[in-house]
Image (spheres, rainbow, N blue to C red):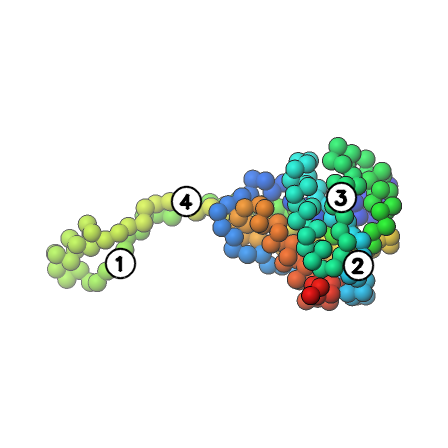
Amino acid sequence: MSPRSHRVLVATVVLAGLAGCSTTSNKGTHFVSTWKAPDAAPLTVKQGDKVVAMVISQEDGTRRKDEDALCDELRARGFRPIPSYTLVPTDQVDDQAKALATIRSSAATAIFGARPISADTSEKNVPTQWAGGSPLYDFGTFYNLGWQSQTTPAHTVTTTVVRIQLLVYTLPQEKLLWSAESVTTDPGQLDSFFAELVKAAAAQMTREGVLAPPAS
């Protein structure tokens, strides 16, 4: 298999490696960089086209769930999505030549893809903090502020930053059409994180003229 063919196969939609990144909130996703081919346009991958969505994960349940979530967004955009688990079972993904041949034979015009870059978690120790008050001109004020005011006990704040590279390849030309690097801080539950990331990527591609607006 050529290096280019290998890239087409592995650069597919992914949430693998992020299972340990679940937190309690979602502070949103933004794109730190994007690139599109000079000739990229909504007609390159048009509504009605058959496209492949693949999640690279050894966890079959995760792969199926996330591919289905991606297909939901692609379907809303007017495409005919194919989850890759219907083409390449998880226990056969290591056979790259066979998997790529199967994807090619599906008559799909594109592969929507991504790969995890990093999932970094940092901790910050916050010391005990006391509520503020007026100037302590008398002992009564001092006493009341000291014993009655609320305090914030010392605690640790954990922050998770997830970076993912998203890509779209056209088939059968195997040409990179669009790519971006997304950054999400404290992604929250993985189910909602993936769905939100897919929607953000589709909206970004629409703004950049790669995808047509969603079907009304």
Label located before the other in sequence (3 or 2): 2
| Quarter of the picture holding the N terminus | top right
**Residue 156 got which mark?**
4
Name the residue at 32% across, 49% down: 152
Q: Earlier in the sequence, mark 4 or mark 1?
A: 1
- Type of residue at label 4? Thr
CB atoms of marks 4 and 1 within 8 Å? no
User: Which residue occupies 81% across, 57% down?
Assistant: 49
Residue at the spot of label 3: 84
Distance of label 4 from label 1 (alpha carbons): 21 Å
Q: Is residue 83 visible?
A: yes
* Left or right of 35 in this view: 159: left
Which of the two discs, 2 and 4, labels the residue nearer the N terminus? 2
Residue 201 pos. (x, y %): 66, 58
Looking at the picture, which amino acid does disc 3 mark? Ser
Q: Which mark is residue 132?
A: 1
